[in-house]
Image (cartoon, rainbow, N blue to C red):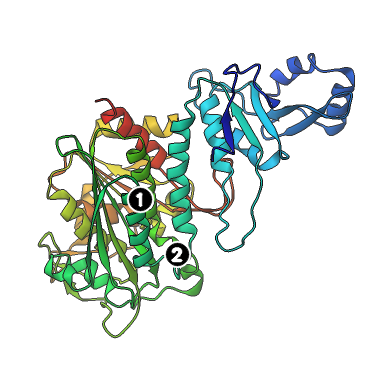
Amino acid sequence: MSKICVKSKSGKQAGSPGCPIHAVTTQTFKQKQKELTKAQRNWLSVEGFSGSAGELALVQNAAGKLDCVLFGVTAPDQKNNRPDLAPGKLATLLPEGRYRFASGISHEADAALAWILSAYDFKRYSGKSKTWPQLVVGAKVDLEEIERIATGVNLARDLINTPANDMGPKQLEAALRKLAKTHKASLSVIRGDNLLKKNLPLVHAVGRASDQTPRLLDMKWGKARTPKVTLVGKGVCFDTGGLNIKPGNSMALMKKDMGGAANTIGLAAMIMAADLPIRLRLIIPAVENNISANAYRPGDVLPSRKGLSVEIGNTDAEGRLVLADALALADEEKPDLLIDMATLTGAARVALGPDLPPFYCDDDELVADIVQAAENTADPLWQMPFWDRYDQWLDSKIADVNHISTGGFAGSLTAALFLRRFVEQARSYVHLDIYGWTPAPLPGVPFGGAAQGIRALYAVIKNRYGKN
């Protein structure tokens, strides 16, 4: 990524090498025109450039060479001057060369991050490599921090984009093992029937039908006497739906069903690279939800680590089962902050679409921090409630709880309520129901595997615990 974004050698923005980029609005473009030659103004008029958001103009000098770039942006809200990822679009539009933001950008660091996030290319299988335009940033931009964040985001994207034949539970373990080695973290793994011996029966039940051994990955990093932050990620590397098999169009994207695990791994990478003074723990139940003679069935009643008996309402709601055992394990050591991330329900997408993940949390102070961080980082999240009255919808006539509700309402909410039953001792708990996929590219957010919420969560964790 250092080839995509570099610092000016002079340390002075105005004297930095690279073609100047001027971000303009429809109003500021009128003033900017006065600084251009008559020939340049005439050319912009022929092009129809008006400074509207998303418009791009390559302005030549008298010698026919690129003189500057004009890029239309939305006028900032003076009351809430929040950054966005719009400037990242330039990385995909500009020809090869060196550029710098010369005017009109109030958040240069955020624009630089957007540039790097847009310049993402998953080329594991195609072999095609794209040459991206290079951005030169000023001395005040913390490029190391930007690259830490972008590295975590791109790691999550890479894991999600890799198909299940190359990203099963074994390969997910290998990816986490590589990250643990890089940052000198410890990693313990419980596999196969040892899951039963170690009291993780729900993880075993969901994963036992696959020829890839189910496992629980448990990584620890940091000093013991620092705040405990624990991440739990749903690692269902492929989801057929089990015996409640998915239709083909619903199964096509199920390589992304480990998106929760991928995002927590990306978040962990940011935290460890920043060397935040916390004791980080990352727990990932890594399984495939497959079909065979020993697959778990609708109507089965299964034990859980928590001691609750769970009636299976539908085998295609497997994610909350593996998370239940993982959350119960995480909760036992009373973490200061417990976060789980999962591509959990279609109901969340019906409610908020693919771009806006809901999160659930009862800690009002933490909710306020998350909402603020989501705005400050242009990493959208939306609070949804733990609506207690719906908890009764999970009642079972023969077990302590059914893992799905009996009706079709509030699917994301009732899934969150089910998971909350397995968390009692953590000081604060947050559940995120993410999509993990971008169906149509946006600035800073290319098509494919998506990192959702982890930039905001990283900001929250850094602000809360980042000071020694």
Q: Which one is in front, 132 or 55?
A: 132
- Earlier along the polypeptide chain: callout 1 or callout 2? 1
Determine if residue 410 is in view: no
Q: Can residue 263 be seen in this view?
A: yes
Residue at 12% x, 69% y: name it.
197
* Quadrant, the C terminus: top left
Query: Element at badge 2?
Result: helix
| Mark 1–mark 2 CB contact (< 8 Å) | no
Q: Which residue is found at the position 90% from the left and 22% from the top? A: 39
Q: Residue 310 carries which label?
A: none
- Viewer-nearest residue: 278 or 107: 278
Quadrant in the picture for residue 383? top left
Label 1 sits on a secondary structure element that is helix
State the residue position of label 2: 255
- Vertical arrangement, residue 80 with respect to residue 113, above or below: above
| Residue plotted at (78% across, 32% down) | 58
Q: What type is the residue that disc 2 sits on?
A: Lys
- State the image coordinates of residue 87 (x, y, percent, origin top left): 61, 33
Q: Relative to residue 395, is residue 464 depicted above or below? A: above
Q: Indicate left or right for 3 with 208 as reference.
A: right
Q: Locate residue 397, reporting x and y percent.
A: 14, 69
Q: What residue type is labelled 1?
A: Leu
Quadrant containing the N terminus is: top right
Kindly report the distance in space between the C-alpha atoms of the residues bearing marks 1 and 2: 21 Å
Q: Which is nearer the eye, 185 or 243?
A: 185
Decide if residue 3 is on the left or right side of residue 80: right
- Outermost residue on the left side: it is 307
The percent position of residue 65, horizontal first and vertical second, equals 83, 29
Residue 179: mark? 1
